[in-house]
Amino acid sequence: MKKLWLTFAQAVTVALGMLFVVALFKPEWINWRFHNGITIQEVNPNAQVNVTHSFANAAAKATPSVVNVFTQKTVRAPRNPLLNDPFFRHFFGNHLDNRPREVSSLGSGVIVSPDGYIITNHHVVAGADEIQVAMSNGKSYPAKVVGSDPETDLAVLKIDATGLPAITFGSSEKLRVGDWVLAIGDPFGVGQTVTLGIVSALGRSHLGINTFENFIQTDAAINPGNSGGALIDAAGNLVGINTAIYSRTGGFQGIGFAIPENTVKKIMEQIIQHGSVTRGWLGVEVQDVSPQIAESFGLSNTKGALVAGVLKNGPAYHAGVRPGDILTAIDGKPVNDSAGLLNIIAGLTPDTQAHLTLLRRGKPLQITLEVGKRPPQSPVSVRPEDENN
């Protein structure tokens, strides 16, 4: 028994000695504390925290690629009905006419290639008679619209210049909520401005801003004039194009939206190559699967998109898709909701085959159809607070 106690005492002594050595040379290994009987893990007060104290290098890398976009267009007010009265026309005709007037607006853009291609928002240049691009070095160039896509609110401009400082594209797919981002543009025409924030959400949709929505949400300040400017990561690489703000006053209120760079690249490449954007089309009208719909259809979740209508003689109609079907996947890509389905369909190549997975009366069904070409859509409307963007 005495020998057993001696062995125990020696073991405790060795353990305490090892604990003392670890506490002396590697205190971060011992980070457990007891508070009121609850075991919690605490950070070592001497541990180094990797915090970026300056984003100057990122800003210096990206700002030469961000430009100011000045547009001018002629607008004509609706004819005043009083002009139809001879009395009013005789005395007040010069003041009541609807002669055209010049309207100027300001936005931002990003140089995407050294040979003069610039990406911006569709609503920045929509209807413009004249477009001028001002570089960060003070030089100014006239620009022409290569092509525009109202459904994603993107447009490509071209200026006659070479050797330009093109932006470096990052990866919006690797962004995480909480990552640092910087917004660069020309808010309110005060001059090029850099603001800092974080990614506050990803994949934002159902906002009614664009037809195709998959926005990066950020609290980096975006104000009128920032539209078309760059959203960059902490390394100075492009991750999005600033496009809209959520605001009750027209000013920044902590929620801004940017189009992810992977969408920007796809749209930009199509516009540069073909002058327009071609998208797939099935000819269906869909809606989200609400909890009530899921319950009535006997579904275990709300994933998928309910087919609310099928266009007669469209691709889906000829393939046998019917109202009441629930689309769950296309070519193996799962459908989470109606917005996700719209993006998947848009990415299909016209005149190719697509394989649809759907539920009909609770039973799975496979349908193959030939993808059509999406017809031209009406331009998105510009909200009042975006008019000067």
Image (tube, rainbow, N blue to C red):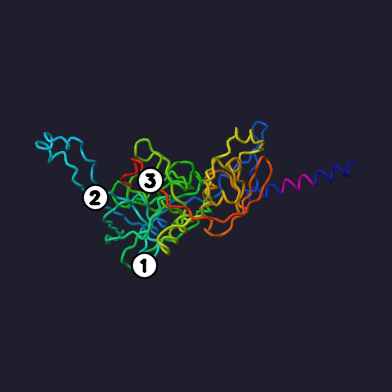
Please provide percent x and percent y for residue 93: 12, 39
Residue 81 to residue 349: above or below: above
In the image, which residues are magenta?
A: 11-17
Does the magenta portion include 13? yes
Q: Secondary structure at mark 1?
A: loop
- The kind of residue tagged 2 is Thr
Sort mark 3 into few (<14), some (14-19) or many (20+) by Cα contacts within 10 Å.
many
Which residue is denoted by mark 2 in the rendering? 74
Whether residues under marks 3 and 2 lie with C-beta atoms below 8 angstroms apart, the answer is no
Residue 263 to residue 219: above or below: below
Does the magenta portion include 70? no
Q: Secondary structure at mark 2?
A: strand
Which residue is denoted by mark 3 in the rendering? 222
Which residue is denoted by mark 1 in the rendering? 115
Residue 195 to residue 131: above or below: above
In the rendered view, does 360 fall on the left or right side of 202? right
Please provide percent x and percent y for residue 134: 29, 58
